[in-house]
Structures are given as structure tokens and as C-alpha cells.
Amino acid sequence: MEPPMEPSGGEQEPGAVRLLDLPWEDVLLPHVLSRVPLRQLLRLQRVSRAFRALVQLHLAGLRRFDAAQVGPQIPRAALAWLLRDAEGLQELALAPCHEWLSDEDLVPVLTRNPQLRSVALAGCGQLSRRALGALAEGCPRLQRLSLAHCDWVDGLALRGLADRCPALEELDLTACRQLKDEAIVYLAQRRGAGLRSLSLAVNANVGDAAVQELARNCPELEHLDLTGCLRVGSDGVRTLAEYCPALRSLRVRHCHHVAEPSLSRLRKRGVDIDVEPPLHQALVLLQDMAGFAPFVNLQV
């Protein structure tokens, strides 16, 4: 693309080259603007019409957009301008927009970007099932999705996701408290073969039935977060040990019905577990008590 003509506003020294005189697509876009933070691009586009056209051309070719690069809070108008021409996004993270992001803001972006592979919507509580439906319907290559703290996610929304996202590998459902065992069972049966990472943390409705179905249907599962899932017990963990050979990390803090014998098999395999074995806990407690520290060897 040839740079548009723009008055210089003054005499140009003989032999001098202005920034905008450099080739846009061969030099400025890949080697200059690609290194400029999004926050600075918003300022740069105000300099002149030519700079605005350059920035818009760069934004239209974005493959990754993270709203956190703009700032902790981003106005609705700024997001709309930044993404209005983007049609090739592969990664989209919108957590800083959580206070106001609505279906009307998000759905057009999803519709224009069917190549999306990673979407992060953590805390975006103003969305609804419609947004998730548009994502599932329009982005068949989706691999990673974060819906943490999205209270609107229910069983029906998750079923739609499980039915239409065959490439899904990583899913964060932390604090999606409307989800019950039945929804997780359906997810496991439909998409378990490809799942590698799943968080069900902080959901008291999830129990052993869901965990056991995940274990039987997710042979490639590497990371599972069950933090605060109060209904999960030792039966679920034993099934994980039996059916999930690829498991590398398990989070079961505050799962009060998970006993150490069910975790020991996973510990022997080197699985990273976020609760210490009882003996280690006792030794640390003794070490912290006055008068015992000199006599306790934690290597025992």
C-alpha cells in the first residue's frame, strides 16, 4: 500500500527521509508498528491522517489482541475502534473489559474472526449464552477458552460449546457455579478425547460423578483444577489415577473429602499436587513451634 500524501507542514531538508516515506507493508508494519504497544498506537493515530491510516492498516492485520496492553481499563469506543477492521485474529483476550463487555460488543468481533484459536473472557459477567453460541458456531478451530468467573455459563451453554468446538484443548470454568455434574459429564463425553487442561475450581456443585467421567474420557488430560470443589472425594481421585496416565498436575486444595491414600498413587508418578502429605504438614508445624526447630529434619 502506498502511503497517502500528507502536507509536511514545513520545508524538508534535501536527502531527508520521513518515517511515512518508508515502505509501509515491507518496513513499517512488520518492523516498526509490530513493536509498538497498543496504548501507544492509540496516541499515534491522532498525529495525522496518514498515521491514522497506517495504524488502521496494522490493526486490520493483527493476529493477537490483548486488551491488557491498552491498560487496566479500556473504554468501549476504544475497543470498537481497535478491532473494527480485524478479520484475522487468532488470539483474543478481553478481561480488562469485564465491567461492560456485552454480547453486542463481542459477537460482531467473533463473527469477523473465524480463525480464533484462543479466547479469554475471564470475569466478563455482562455476556450471555448468545455470545458463547456465536463463538462455538463461528470459531470451529477454538483450542483455548477462559470463562472463569462468568456466572452466566450454564449447562445449556456448555453443551453448545461441547457440540461445536472439536479442537478444544484447554478450558477454564473456574467459579462457573451454575454448572453441575451433568454438564461436565456431557463435556467429557463429547470433547474429552482432546482435553488437556480443565479448571472446575470453586464450584460446590461438581462432585465425583463428573470427575470420574472426565477420567474415563480424557486420556490426554494433563492439568485438572478442582480447588474448592467440596463434593469431590477420594473416589474421583482414584479414578483419575487409574485412567489418566498423562496427568501432570492436580489441584485439590479445600477438597476436604479427598484423603491422602487416594493421592499417594499420583504422588508416586510425580504428579504435582498442591496439598502436602500429612507427615510433611506435621513436620512443618513442629518446625514452626519454639523449641522443636533444632531437632526436626524435613528430609526424613
Image (cartoon, rainbow, N blue to C red):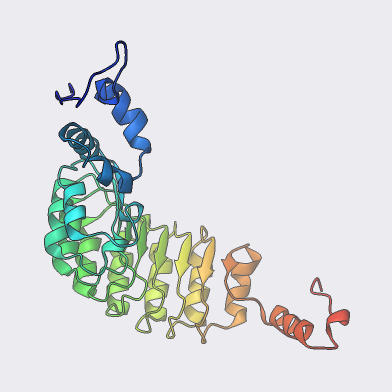
Q: Nearer the viewer, residue 259 or 103?
A: 103
Classify residue 218 as left or right of residue 93.
right
**Quarter residue 19 falls in:** top left
| Quarter the N terminus occupies | top left
Which of 54 and 125 lies nearest the eye of the viewer? Answer: 54
The residue at 16%/63% (across/down) is: 131
Q: In the image, 300: left or right of 153?
A: right
Query: Quadrant of residue 86 in the image?
Result: top left
Quadrant housing residue 274: bottom right
- Quadrant containing the C terminus is bottom right
Of residues 127 and 255, the one drawn nearer to the viewer in this rendering: 127
Residue at figure coordinates x 24%, y 68% from the top left:
158
Kindly identify the residue that appears in the image at 81 percent across and 88 percent down: 290
The percent position of residue 281, horizontal first and vertical second, equals 69, 81
**Residue 121 x %, y %:** 29, 62
Q: Position of residue 70 (x, y in %)?
A: 32, 53
Query: Residue 279 placed where, x, y %?
Result: 72, 81
Residue at point 42% right, 85% down? 231
- Please state the total of marks drawn on the protein image: 0
In the rendered structure, the answer to whether residue 197 lies left or right of residue 98 reads right
Q: Is residue 191 above or below residue 179?
A: above
